Amino acid sequence: MCGIVGYIGHRDAYPIITNGLKRLEYRGYDSAGIALYNGNGLELFKTKGKVAQLEVISKKRSSNAHIGIGHTRWATHGVPSDINAHPHTSNSGDLVLIHNGIIENYNSLKIALENKGFHFESDTDTEVLVNLIEYVQKTEGHKLGKAVQLALKEVVGAYAIAVIDNKKPNEIVVAKLGSPLAIGIGNDEFFIASDASPFIEYTKNAIYLEDEQMAIIRLEKGLRIRKIKDDSLVSPVIQELHFSLEQIEKGGYDHFMLKEIFEQPKAIKDTYRGRLVGKEGLIKMAGVDDHLDKFLNADRLIIVACGTSWHAGLVAEYIFENLARIPVEVEYASEFRYRNPVISSRDVVIAISQSGETADTLAAIKLAKSHGAFVFGVCNVVGSTIARETNAGSYTHAGPEIGVASTKAFTTQITILTLIALKLGRLKGTLEEKQYIETVRGLEAIPEKVSIALKENDAVEAIAKVYNQAKNCLYLGRGYNFPVALEGALKLKEISYIHAEGYPAAEMKHGPIALIDENMPVIVIATKKGHYDKIVSNIQEIKSRKGKIIAIVSQGDQTVRELADHVIEVPETLECLAPLLTTIPLQLLSYHIAVQLNRNVDQPRNLAKSVTVE
Ligand code: F6R
């Protein structure tokens, strides 16, 4: 994780870097630091805590600097502290470096450097890397770029780095393996960042470095990209960015999470816009259309993902099996990659990832590809590593998701996967035309229905007030709503720090029912279509053990209303589309509880948006 920002050009580097770091705090916020070349030498400021704290301690910086690098950290090696904060300096004080990733062989490198007289102040792997570069530079007399290249050949692990040399302060050297690195191209100026958000107001042109590439970026002379392995030159591919500054700001909401929850009607529409065509409900998806044979002949689909994206995969399992009759397995990417999974060239692997950078999902993709499987990506971040590593894919087009807790990513991932299942179901003939059209129309009606569900916001806030002191919560659902229960529980624990469990409602009697007493809030998803009578029985079981019931019900429901302590209504829809609506009140409930508990909703403790370490 961690976020990196750099600037070289004619403007004042400081505000570009600090504002950029704030936008990247979703990647980690344990410490922050900045190094600036002010014309006479390097100035370095770093501190435990957030960028706001960095701004306090860096007030005394001397003057405008036109070159600089900054970092916001998610701690891996060494506790969050001033000393472990980046940038890290080499022993001579000449080199400063920022790093996102992990150097796995840092310990052996450290011992070797110590034997050569180097000393270390921090516990980080990054300080080892900057000194390794210095060692190569000094002993072999290389320029910075060459020294970085040779040092990186010794490194095992993942990195996106940026380095400045105090003795040659007209260049920044960057390199990438595993962690993302974007270079914004302006007029005689360059921006470096973990994603394009820090420089979107300055340029819409960006280069995304590929793995094992480095770039030497020089004032006036421009940039040169080389392969680290063989030093060959690479022609830069400049991409046009399609998002705006407005999209990554809060737009009047108190938190990004709330903004993103309320953006869902638009995000879902943007996901199917241009893909659902005409009155006959044709589904056009280039990523699928170009590889139809793979999907239609697949023995099975294997979905790999983590966290919320894994929950979207679970919903998709129900959808694909029901609509397209293709067997589906849903795997935690982190488990899949370390098992010895049976994969064949007749499997289609679908990797789901909002960020497109999740290390475990990426590793699962590589494993699947090495076994000959066709790998399809469902990502939100355009140009992300997973989007590039997969054989084909579809973007969700949800727009930037900044809040650490995933919200619109979940509903838009389900939307994409529903479109694919519908398309395959129609082509395979597993879906009758009437059901196909009905589902397509149902999907088109979802944005409006999400807007209606969002109108319950005040009611949900009032319910949150009743339960915000709870120590535990149980979430129950059946069928399509079972993964929604898991997702509701994840949302609550990650932003409010209240322990929560999601369960298939019928499993309750096999264990969790023992937890139920008058202090246990139980959130039950009890929409009309699908196992309704069964879930009403589950509610009665909870009631007779004095549990407090918050039920998510279909509009107009009377039966559950009489049993539950609170009900939150969502509009009726088809059973397979229910998760797109039932998840809304659960997102709002977690949000309000977290706000009422004064938690940092957008940046919950210990978490980061983009998990680029395993
Ligand atoms: C939960 C959450 C995480 C992510 C997970 C995967 O709200 O945000 O569980 O869903 O880290 O991230 P992506 O989808 O970027 O691969």
Image (spheres, grey):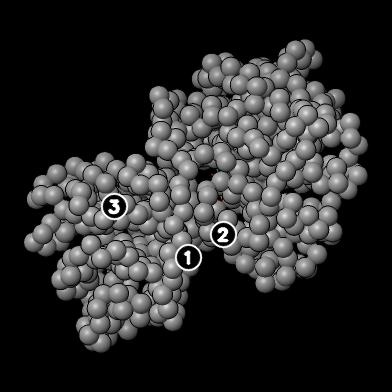
Which amino acid, mark 1? Answer: Glu
Residue drawn at x 35%, y 47% is: 203
Determine whether the residue tagged by mark 1 lies in a helix, strand or loop: loop
Q: Where 417 falls versus 586 (above or below)?
A: below
Which quarter of the picture shows residue 229? bottom left
Determine whether the residue tagged by mark 3 lies in a helix, strand or loop: loop
Q: Nearer the viewer, residue 46 or 19?
A: 19
Distance (Cα) linking label 2 and label 1: 9 Å
Q: Where 423 falls versus 362 (above or below)?
A: above
Q: Residue under circle 1?
A: 210
Residue drawn at x 53%, y 16% is: 458
Determine whether the residue tagged by mark 2 lies in a helix, strand or loop: helix
Is 519 left or right of 324, judged from the image as shown? Answer: left
* First of labels 1, 3 by sequence position: 3
Which amino acid, mark 3? Answer: Asn
**Disc nearest the viewer among 1 and 3:** 3
Q: Is residue 469 visible?
A: no
In contact (CB < 8 Å): disc 1 and disc 3: no
* First of labels 2, 1 by sequence position: 1
Is 95 left or right of 261, judged from the image as shown? Answer: left
How dense is the environment of label 3, judged by Cα within 10 Å: few (below 14), some, or many (20 and up)? few
Q: Residue under circle 3?
A: 187
Q: Residue under circle 2?
A: 388
Which quarter of the picture shows residue 509? top right
Q: Nearer the viewer, residue 228 or 82?
A: 228
Q: Where 304 falls versus 263 (above or below)?
A: below
Residue 23 place in picture, x, y as percent: 37, 43
Ligand 1 closer than 8 Å to the CB at disc 2? no
Which quarter of the picture shows residue 445? top right
